[in-house]
């Protein structure tokens, strides 16, 4: 941050060292906050929309449930044979 504030002082001669440090700190915080908000927004949009991976997983879960049901039927059949 110190280097950015010194660069800011060189570019704009009217900034003091403390003023430029405050500007750099504030800019860093604002940028960090904006990126965090965008990250959360992007995550929410991905969850809201039917993500292709989520569709595949849903299909796999239904296939596994069908196979489980078939295995239970087979087990009851085998229990009846004993």
Image: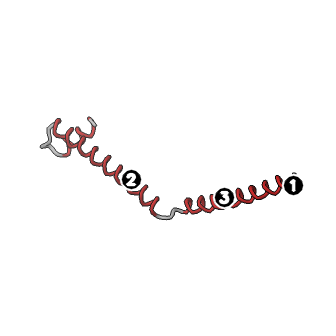
Q: Secondary structure at mark 2?
A: helix
Mark 3 lies on residue: 65
Tag 1 near tag 2, CB within 8 Å: no
Asked whether, in this view, residue 80 is left or right of residue 59, the answer is right
Q: How many marks?
A: 3
Q: Estimate the spatial distance between the alpha carbons at disc 1 and disc 2, rounded to whole Å.
A: 56 Å
Mark 1 lies on residue: 81
The residue drawn where x is 39% and y is 53% is: 40
Q: Estimate the spatial distance between the alpha carbons at disc 1 and disc 3, rounded to whole Å.
A: 25 Å
Give whichever of discs 1 and 3 has the lower sequence position: 3
The residue drawn where x is 28% and y is 44% is: 29
Asked whether, in this view, residue 9 is left or right of residue 44, the answer is left
- Residue reaching furthest to the left: 14
Rendered position, 38 above or below 3: below
Mark 2 lies on residue: 40
In the image, residue 74 lies at what x, y percent? 79, 57
User: Would you call the spot at circle 2 few (<14 residues within 10 Å), some (14-19), or many (20 or more)?
Assistant: few
User: Would you call the spot at circle 3 few (<14 residues within 10 Å), some (14-19), or many (20 or more)?
Assistant: few
Give whichever of discs 1 and 2 has the lower sequence position: 2
In the image, residue 71 lies at what x, y percent? 75, 56
Asked whether, in this view, residue 7 is left or right of residue 71, the answer is left
Near-viewer residue (24 or 30): 30
Q: Estimate the spatial distance between the alpha carbons at disc 3 and disc 2, rounded to whole Å.
A: 32 Å
In the image, residue 1 lies at what x, y percent? 28, 37
The mark closer to the camera, 1 or 3, is 1
Asked whether, in this view, residue 37 is left or right of residue 80, the answer is left
Give whichever of discs 3 and 2 has the lower sequence position: 2
Q: Secondary structure at mark 3?
A: helix
When asked about the image quadrant of residue 80, the answer is bottom right
């Amino acid at each position: 941050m110190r280097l950015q504030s010194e660069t800011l002082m060189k570019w704009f001669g009217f900034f003091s060292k403390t003023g430029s440090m405050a500007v750099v700190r504030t800019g860093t915080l604002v940028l960090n906050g904006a990126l965090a908000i965008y990250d959360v927004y992007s995550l929410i949009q991905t969850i809201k929309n039917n993500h292709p991976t989520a569709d595949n997983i849903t299909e796999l879960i239904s296939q596994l449930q069908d196979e489980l049901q078939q295995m239970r039927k087979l087990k009851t059949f085998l229990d009846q044979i004993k």
